[in-house]
Amino acid sequence: MQSGPVKSGHAQAGMKQAGTNSPVRVGVVGFGYWGPNLVRNLDRMSTDRMSGGGADLVAVCDISEEHLAKLKSLYPHVAATTEIDAFLADYNLDAVVIATAAPTHFDIARQAIMAGKHCFVEKPLTLTSADARELIKLAEEHQVTLMVGHLMVYHTAINWVRDYIASGKLGDVLYLYLQRLNLGKVRTEENAFWSLAPHDVSIALYLLGETPDRVSATGAAHITPGVHDTVFANLHFASGRMANIHVSWLDPHKTRKLTVVGTKQMLVFDDMQATEKIWVYDKGLGEPKSALGWGEDLRLRFGDIHVPWVPMAEPLEIEMQHFLDCCRTGQTPRSSGASGLSVVRVLEAADESMAAGGAPIPTLEA
């Protein structure tokens, strides 16, 4: 992907008037691994755009002629180019969706924002927190939306869990832990935490509603020297709550699981289940005898298991619609640039901790 600076004459206002129902003119950068899924959803929204509130998928940019040939065979009505400057200048785009390799995110997003385009960037937002802060600053200066592809915060089951926590039925959340495991795909350019954990970090921060104050992590590079294929990370929060994240591509089972432990109940979300994804366990801390102090006669409570019915919808469709809505209205995205920065800082801290033998690394600015 060419990533030279955009010519000064190319910048144009991408912001639409708040409240307009006009379709958002969107272009996608990257049609390799994840880009086709984004294009599929945006094209479907383009088909429905006459009903208002949808997208107008205009163009796709990719450095690979092979990728663009596949695009043209599937979507002959969508323009294709290998030139990023022409992509940003020639198609009157309102918004740009970036689905390229993570090392290219910063440069492409920077060009798009400076060209006055609303910008959606797949996770992770950038590879450094300094770059993430610069994109946030640029988006504010150019008055455009910056949103990050933290897909799981648009999952209906995760939002059910968040609402259930807010209801108080779980009691006080003590800790949660997440597992994202499988056998392969082994990567050599990024470690397992940067590859897999952005999903889990974003879930933990979204459910707990706070950013960790320190992170400690240990890992091992069993296959490629210097590239951790197995990582255990602990996120500590100022509230005293904890989150543990285990990621690996050296595991016999494909696992996508979240466990939340509360004082009244406990909950498990298993994304590998086709239907019964959430199980609520009526287990928790029993009340002490009133005549005694807390902990002097602590009992554990065991109860029933409840499997709620949660209607499912494709998270990517919900995510893309949310981006379009934010472009039109100017509202802050659920997965804003600030949330993207928080996730990147946790990823950085995990790397720093592993390099320091598991020592806790602060994540918040002084």
Image (cartoon, rainbow, N blue to C red):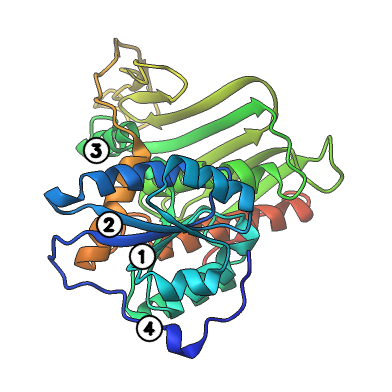
> Which circle's residue, 3 or 2, is located before the other in the chain?
3
Secondary structure type for disc 4: helix
How many C-alpha atoms fall within 10 Å of the one at disc 2: few (<14), some, or many (≥20)? many
Q: Look at label 3 and name its amino acid.
A: Asp
Q: Which mark is residue 95?
A: 1
Q: Which amino acid does label 2 sit on?
A: Leu
Residue 13, image quadrant = bottom left
The image quarter in which residue 277 lies: top left
Mark toward the start of the polypeptide (2 vs 1):
1
Mark 3 and mark 2: Cα distance apart in space:
24 Å
In this rendering, position of residue 97 left or right of residue 185: left
Reply above or below: 247 against 16. Answer: above
Spatial separation of the CA atoms under disc 1 and disc 3: 31 Å
**Residue labelled with disc 2:** 324
Tell me the crowding category of disc 1: few under 14, some 14 to 19, or many 20 or more residues within 10 angstroms, Cα based: many
Query: Which mark is on residue 141?
Result: 4
Q: Considering the numbered disc 2 on the image, is that residue within a helix, a strand or a loop?
A: helix
**Nearer the viewer's eye, disc 1 or disc 3?**
1
Q: What residue type is labelled 4?
A: Glu
Q: What element carries label 3?
A: helix
Label 2 vs label 4, nearer the camera = 2
**Which residue bears the numbered disc 3?**
163
